[in-house]
Image (tube, rainbow, N blue to C red):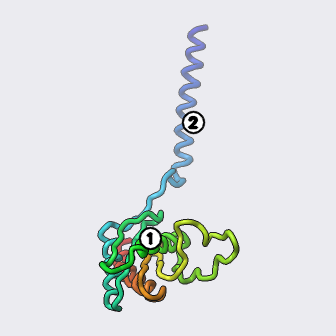
Amino acid sequence: MTYQKNSRKCLFALLSIFSFGLLNVATADEEPPWISVKRITLETAFTIARQAIDTCQKEGVQVSVTVVDRAGAPQVMLRDVLAPEVSVTISEQKARAAVSFNVKTSAMKGRFTEHGSVAKVEGLVFSAGGVPINAAGRILGGVGVSGAPSGALDEKCAQAGVDAILDTLEMAD
């Protein structure tokens, strides 16, 4: 009797192991339970910010620039010597809005006009000057510029920062 119980236990254990193995084989063609995320390097983020600052300086204005990663976390922030202190916060919030909605912030003008709309979410600014960083079909981050006399100039400088690295990002994939 004990031999039969042990044999049944052993057979059950072998069947369990075998069926688990088949289960693993059956799911081997499915995607893994994690994702790989491309991120820009610190050097790339710095290049974006530096080019944005340089472009605005050529226009005779001093600004703040923030580059955020795909989650909206600041990666690089540069503030030109005479840029107003508040421009640091605004540049970050423009960058975060651009990456959150994957669109230039200038394109969102008038989009959120109802009371209590998303435009009232703390930490997001929807005025021109935020540009998403996209390459090879992926959103990689956002850049925000603040401090120029117009949002259009803020956006021009932000776009110049993205343009400075776009070919490199596209070719790297």
Instruction: Classify 29 as above or below 116.
Output: above
Q: Which quarter of the rendered picture does the C terminus lie within?
A: bottom left
Left or right: 146, with 2 as reference point: left
Q: Going by the picture, which residue comes out furthest to the bottom?
A: 59
Q: Quadrant of residue 11?
A: top right
Measured as percent of width and height from the top left, residue 93 is found at: 48, 71
Q: Is residue 82 left or right of residue 89?
A: left
Q: Residue shown at 52%/67% (left/top)?
A: 123
Residue at (57, 36) in percent of width and height: 19
Amino acid under disc 2: Ser
N-terminal label among 1 and 2: 2
Q: Residues within 10 Å of mark 1 (few under 14, many from 20)?
A: some
Q: For label 2, count other residues whose C-alpha is less than 10 Å away and answer few (under 14), some (14-19) or many (20+).
A: few
Q: Which mark is residue 130?
A: none
Mark 1 or 2, closer to the camera: 1
**Residue 89, numbered circle:** 1
Q: Which residue is mark 2?
A: 19
Rounded to the nearest angstrom, the CA distance separating label 1 from label 2 is 57 Å
Query: Residue 136: percent from the left, percent from the top?
Result: 44, 74
In this view, the residue in front, 105 or 19, is 105
Q: Secondary structure at mark 1?
A: helix
Could you say which is closer to the camera, residue 20 or residue 4?
20
Q: Secondary structure at mark 2?
A: helix
Q: Residue at x 56, y 42 (%)?
A: 23
Q: Amino acid at mark 1?
A: Thr
